[in-house]
Amino acid sequence: MKKGLLLFLIIVLVMVMSTAAYTVDTREHAIITRFGEVQKIVVNEDNYDTVMETINNSEKYSHVKISTSKGLHFKVPFIDTVEKLENRLITYKTASRQVNTLDKKILILSNNAQWKIVDPLLFRLTMKNEQQASLRLDDILYSEINVQVGKTDAHTLIADKDYLEEMSHTVVNDVNLELAKYGMEVLDNRILKTDLHESNIQNIYARMEAERKQKAQQYRSEGEEEKLKIISSTDKDAAIMISEAKKDAEIIKGEGDAEATQIYSTAYSADPDFYEFYQTLEMYKTTLDGTTMVIDEESPLFKYLTR
């Protein structure tokens, strides 16, 4: 009898302990409620300040305890309930939807968002679960994307990837202002696909082609202008170099002539007869080369031919 009672008590104790203990993984938040009222929250350290601010701003939740210790925890058996929320990034992909551009064109857009729960208490009070959160996020994202697309021409959204990236950042910032009251935050939003509605395809692509041709012509014109500048600059530099070279040549020639004159003068002063003889020989070389001439006996040219 005693053994049976002991076994029963052990079983009851194990059951009580199993319902009293719970574990919290680092990848999740835990909210402990008692009769539907939040009693305790287990969060990561980086969420502590956010949750504490929510508690301090409401007397209704001033009794709520916060723990940043993950692992094994205990609660009141059969009375307390543990609700767990995702602490990792959650990916939400929207369905393709129509949006209207500034130039009255219809685009088909689809996008996805990476979001997370940053305030488990506020999230639990407003959204209850991820399904409701996804629906709310979808509404807010679509509304904000529609606003941004309505400020932009269709061809810019399709062709300008940098603008699309900038627009995504704007959407994230504006969406987070709205999501803050739900304890949620979007970390990234990407436009996955931008398709033209059938009624707009020909017009948009014709406009894009015309703009690309205009841009190509602009690049060609700028290239031709730069080419002419380079040629003009090169011709100018060449003309300057030739002019300077001619000037240097004239200077060198003048210096050479002056030096030759000086040499001739020195030679004449040193030996007038030899100088006269040398000059006559030079005259023979330039005037008698292959030429038949009749020279008078009294001519200076005849002087050294008879010697």
Image (spheres, rainbow, N blue to C red):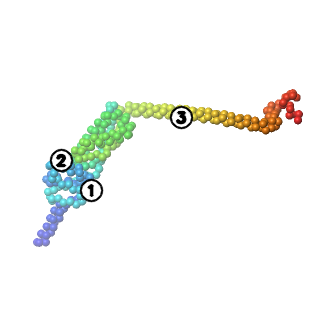
- Measured in 3D between alpha carbons, the distance from the residue under mark 1 to the one under mark 2, in whole angstroms, is 27 Å
**Count of marks placed on residues:** 3
Q: Position of residue 290 (x, y in %)?
A: 82, 32
Is residue 110 visible in the rendered image? The answer is no
Q: Are marks 3 and 2 in contact (CB under 8 Å)?
A: no
Q: Nearer the viewer, mark 1 or mark 2?
A: 2
Q: Amino acid at mark 1?
A: Thr
Q: CA distance from mark 3 to mark 2?
A: 71 Å
Disc 1 element: loop
Residue, disc 3:
230
Neighbor class of circle 1 (other Cα within 10 Å; few <14, some 14-19, many 20+) is some
Q: Which numbered circle lies on residue 41?
A: none
Relative to 265, say whether 22 is above or below: below
Mark earlier in primary sequence (3, 2): 2
Q: Kindly report the distance in space between the C-alpha atoms of the residues bearing marks 1 and 3.
A: 66 Å
Q: Which mark is residue 26?
A: 1
Residue 303: which quarter of the image?
top right
Question: CB of mark 1 within 8 Å of CB of mark 2?
Answer: no
Location of the N terminus (image quadrant): bottom left
Could you tell which of marks 1 and 2 lies nearer the N-terminus?
1
| Residue at the limit of the structure toward the bottom, as seen here | 2
- The residue shown at (34%, 42%) is 192
Is there any visible trace of residue 268 in the rendered image? yes
Q: Secondary structure at mark 3?
A: helix
Q: Which residue is mark 2?
A: 57
Quadrant of the image containing the C terminus: top right
Query: Of the residues shown, which amino acid type is indicated by label 2?
Result: Asn
Q: Residue at x 87, y 28 (%)?
A: 298
Q: Residue shown at 70%/36% (left/top)? A: 256
Residue at x 78%, y 36% (from the top left corner):
268
Determine the residue located farthest toward the left in the rendered image.
Answer: 1
- Measured from the top left, where is residue 33 in percent x and y? 16, 53
